Image (cartoon, rainbow, N blue to C red):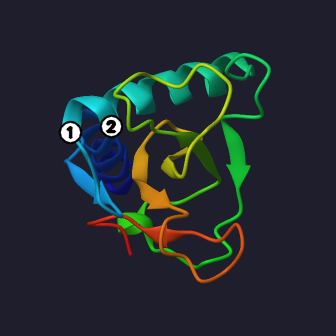
Amino acid sequence: MRLFIISLSALLATALPAPQTTCGTQKYTAAQITAAKNAACNYVRQGTTAGSSKYPESYQDREGFTFHGVDGPYYEFPILSSGKVYSGGSPGADRIIINDDCILAGEITHTGSSVTNGFVGCAGTS
């Protein structure tokens, strides 16, 4: 029974739509977050990266986010203010975080971090 509950929880986590968020002053729709998550997931599953970039990249969570209780290991992947899905080049400041089961853990940004190359949570990520 316990395995069933754990499996059901994982299924629901992957089936729930991504919420919208704000990173700094940049707003992202649920559709933009889902598109970035799906692209990151495809790269993780294929063992490839976007263009000649390093993304999706292993994310070590040095900041100590709880990510809605989603367990790692984690990957970070850019989400772009242009609304396009990242395919290489400049990653910008904002990232989505998924785990190796492709479950969305949260969104983070360099914008507003007091630490060089550090991250802070976007709205809804702590």
Q: Position of 31 compared to 121: left or right?
A: left
Near mark 1 (Cα within 10 A), the count class, few <14, some 14-19 or many ≥20, is some
Q: Nearer the viewer, residue 20 or 66?
A: 20
How many marks the image carries: the answer is 2
- Residue 125 vs 58, above or below: the answer is below
Q: Position of 35 compared to 94: left or right?
A: left
Q: Quadrant of residue 30?
A: top left
Quadrant in which the C terminus appears: bottom left
- Residue 37 vs 46, above or below: the answer is below
Q: Nearer the viewer, residue 26 or 57?
A: 26
Residue appearing at x 61%, y 38% in the figure: 91
Q: Position of 121 compared to 117: left or right?
A: left
Residue appearing at x 40%, y 45% in the figure: 104
Disc 1 + disc 2, Cβ < 8 Å: yes
Indicate which disc residue 80 carries: none
Determine the CA span between mark 1 and mark 2: 6 Å
Residue appearing at x 29%, y 52% in the figure: 5
Indicate which disc residue 33 carries: 2
Element assignment for label 1:
loop
Tell me where residue 89 appears, x and y as whole percent: 68, 26
Q: Position of 74 compared to 95: left or right?
A: right
Indicate which disc residue 29 carries: 1
Residue appearing at x 42%, y 42% in the figure: 103
Q: Residue furthest bottom?
A: 114
Near mark 2 (Cα within 10 A), the count class, few <14, some 14-19 or many ≥20, is many
Query: Which amino acid, by three-letter code, is at mark 2?
Result: Ile
Q: Quadrant of residue 80?
A: top left
Query: Which amino acid, by three-letter code, is at mark 1?
Result: Thr
Q: Quadrant of residue 2?
A: bottom left
Element assignment for label 2:
helix
Tell me where residue 84 appears, x and y as whole percent: 40, 22
